[in-house]
Amino acid sequence: MNTKITIAIDGFSSTGKSTVAKQLAKKLGYIYVDTGAMYRAVTLYAMQHNYIGNDFLHTSKLISDLDKIRLTFQFNEALGFAEMYLNGKNIEQEIRGLDVSNLVSKIAAISEVRKKLVSEQQLMGKNKGIVMDGRDIGTVVFKDAALKIFMTASADTRATRRYEELKKRGDDVSYAAILKNVTDRDLMDTMRSDSPLVKAKDAIEVDNSDLTLEGQFELILQLVNKKLNS
């Protein structure tokens, strides 16, 4: 079938949005965009310029620098997906650590940052044939997406997954710190005034607390095929 659609995947942190979005994009031959990586990249920029820390945020300084922040995705054939670049530098590994995770929700709450990134995201998806995951894809970026998925799981489940992922990568982290990060981000993402994390009215909720990666993928692929054949 030649018809291409826009697939919007929203949900809480560490629910596996990016994992399943990558799988779907590869299966369908679609473009995959990890919007969370874009907010993480801006967070890293702010950290590098000492605009943000655990107890401070120089919002006006970051806003004045937004035109200097160039975000691009470059496909890595060895990995099978696109990696995040900030001003020409690969930052994929740097943005996945807990230090960035602890601060990204503060950056994502800045309206000027959201306006810049939403505009870029909409441009990326103008021709459809795209799978995009984030917090506001189905509610703000692509309100008319053909298929909207909202992913959730218990905080304990998400913290355990994130802990195992970071430990496998070699990061020195504690489960307690990651659980706190997960719950703190949930609160900030759902309570922010600009584009809070909410389930779109026409989104299909998928609770993957008890699903394997394979089971999750098969379930969502069935939803995609149903939409493509409708």
Image (cartoon, helix red, strand yellow):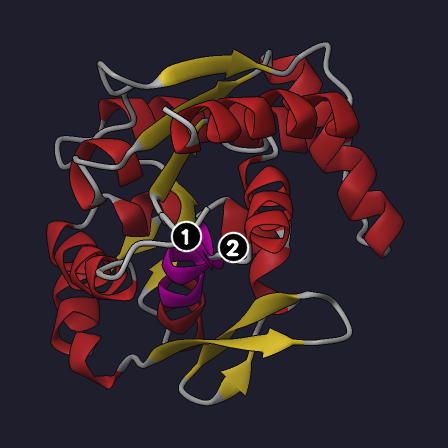
Furthest-bottom residue in view? 88
Q: Which residue is at a point 81% across and 49% down the rendered structure image?
A: 172
Please state if 230 lies on the left or on the right of 21 as rendered.
left
Identify the residue position indicated by label 2 in the image.
Answer: 100
Evaluate if marks 2 and 1 touch, with contact meaning CB atoms under 8 Å apart. no
Task: Give the amino acid at mark 2.
Answer: Val
Which residue, given by chain and number where applicable, does mark 1 sit on?
2
Residue under the image location 36 percent in, 38 percent down: 8
Q: Which residue is found at the position 40% from the left and 86% from the top?
A: 87
Q: Main secondary structure of the magenta part?
A: helix
Please provide percent x and percent y for residue 140.
17, 39
Examine the rendering and report whether any part of residue 142 can be seen: yes
**Relative vertical location of residue 220 with respect to residue 174 in this rendering, above or below:** above
Q: Residue at x 64, y 46 (%)?
A: 23
In this picture, residue 19 sits left or right of residue 187:
right
Q: Nearer the viewer, mark 2 or mark 1?
A: 1
Sooner in the amino-acid sequence: mark 2 or mark 1: 1
Task: Establish if 94 lies above or below 220.
Answer: below
Q: Residues within 10 Å of mark 1 (few under 14, many from 20)?
A: few
Eyeballing the image, is 189 above or below 210? Answer: below
Where residue 89 appears, as percent x and y from the top left, is: 52, 86
Residue 107 coordinates in the image, percent (x, y): 30, 52
Is residue 54 shown to the viewer in this render? no
What amino acid is labelled 1 in the image? Asn
Extent of the magenta region: 31-42
Quarter in which the C terminus is drawn: top left
Front residue of 168 and 55? 168
Q: Looking at this view, is 179 or 206 the one in front?
A: 206
Residue 193 coordinates in the image, percent (x, y) = 13, 31
Dividing the picture into quadrants, the one containing residue 70 is: bottom left
Q: Is residue 188 magenta?
A: no
